[in-house]
Amino acid sequence: MESTFLGYGTFYLVRNNLSPVAKEIEGALHYNHSDIGDILAITAISYGLSKFLMGSVSDRCDARRFMTCGLLLTACCNFAFGTVANYSMHLALWSLNGFAQGMGWPPCGRSMGHWFSENERGLTFSIWNTSHNFGGGIAGYLATWAVAEYGGWQYAFYVPGAIATVGAIYLLLRLRDTPQSVGLPSIEEYRNDYPNSVGDLDSLERTLTAKELFFDKVLTNKLVWLLAIANFFAYITRYSMLDWGPTYLREVKGATLQQGGLAVLVNEFGGIPSTIFLGWVSDRIGGRRGMVAALCTIPIFAAFAVIMFTPKGYLWLDMAMLAVIGLFVYPLINLIVIAALDVASKKAIGTAAGFIGLFGYIGRTVQAKGFGWTTHHFSELYGQEAAWNIVLYAILASAVICGALLALTWNVRPKA
């Protein structure tokens, strides 16, 4: 729990550090919103593909070495990004960074699935899942602080890159793979959960083939597909404020550079207590993750609506609504993934989560590119505020669709 928590939080320091300083990069390198949108979009799709492909690889690899390698690669991408001032190179480097980032979640999912049992999964996965709230929240503020302190956008990548390098060394020293890799029994055997026979236990612990991982556990599972599509729309609501929130607040609501970075921190940290609490609640009501996740979309819709209709000069209210969004969007994302793991297998955790994540990051790609183009194109025709309102209507629609899809899984429980 400790090493995966701190390790995955560190991944976010070198992933969420571009958006808070996007305006500085635009000013220094003469990029526009559409250019930044392209970088965010190609990164999202490379991350989604990597999470799916690397998920299946991680299910068959040592989590310690796999995760260490991924964090070191993403640190190198950040150092390189800060040293160049060319759009094509930035596009390529942040795409490569996205692919390296795909090596973060799968080994964590593998470790959590092997070290904690199914009937405590809601709570333990939720505690671990708040690591990206800590990392993501600190990332925005750290990036803007580094720029303000050292006087250049490059430091938003140098400082997190240095921290990530230290984090990679930490993972190599602290993280362990499965209980069996250090001479302990499997979690099912230790807790005497299931199954009861030695033959069944051996079957449970058997490493699955690629065909079993992709086809038997994921691609032919209707519930996994339903959750994946819901995740597509959930990621639009999640990343809209992470990718574009600081820029929106600065252009429409009059926020400063560091207030924009603070907005990311408020959004991320807002989800920490609720993610843990609602994960615990889902355990207590028999693992009905879909029901809790569907209900989370209601306050998300309401908070985005308040932001949309709040006039300039009420930044405190916008910040409060960002906290509300964070309060419910992170439990929503967390419970979608846990629900997928419930209906798949601990031996296919990386593959199932990778497939769900692929759809999520396709959603992020759509919003990054689509919202970037929308704000750039319609601002010239109707003004900035009207252009951003089009974006907010799209986010509201996504929240509604996500909630409707998750309502179809209202009574689904873990297979065990």
Image (cartoon, rainbow, N blue to C red):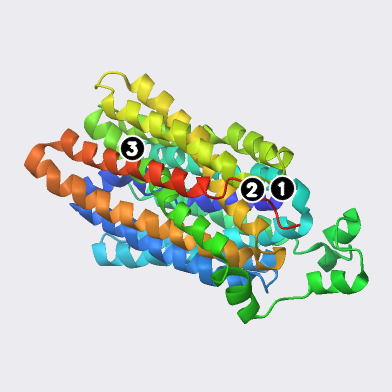
Q: Position of residue 392 (x, y in %)?
A: 29, 38
Look at the numbered discs 1 and 2 and tell me whether their residues touch, using CB distance below 8 Å: yes
Q: Position of residue 195 (x, y in %)?
A: 86, 63
Q: Which mark is residue 246?
A: 3
- Residue of label 2: 6
Q: Residues within 10 Å of mark 3 (few under 14, many from 20)?
A: many
Look at the numbered discs 3 and 1 and tell me whether their residues touch, using CB distance below 8 Å: no
Amino acid beneath label 1: Glu
The first of marks 3 and 1 along the sequence is 1
- Residue of label 1: 2
Q: Which mark is residue 49?
A: none
Q: Residues within 10 Å of mark 1 (few under 14, many from 20)?
A: few
Q: Secondary structure at mark 1?
A: helix
Q: Residues within 10 Å of mark 2 (few under 14, many from 20)?
A: some
For this orientation, the residue located farthest to the left is 381
Q: Quadrant of the C terminus?
A: bottom right
Q: Secondary structure at mark 3?
A: helix
Look at the numbered discs 3 and 2 and tell me whether their residues touch, using CB distance below 8 Å: no
Residue at 55%, 64% in the rendered image: 222
Distance of mark 1 from mark 2, alpha carbons? Answer: 6 Å
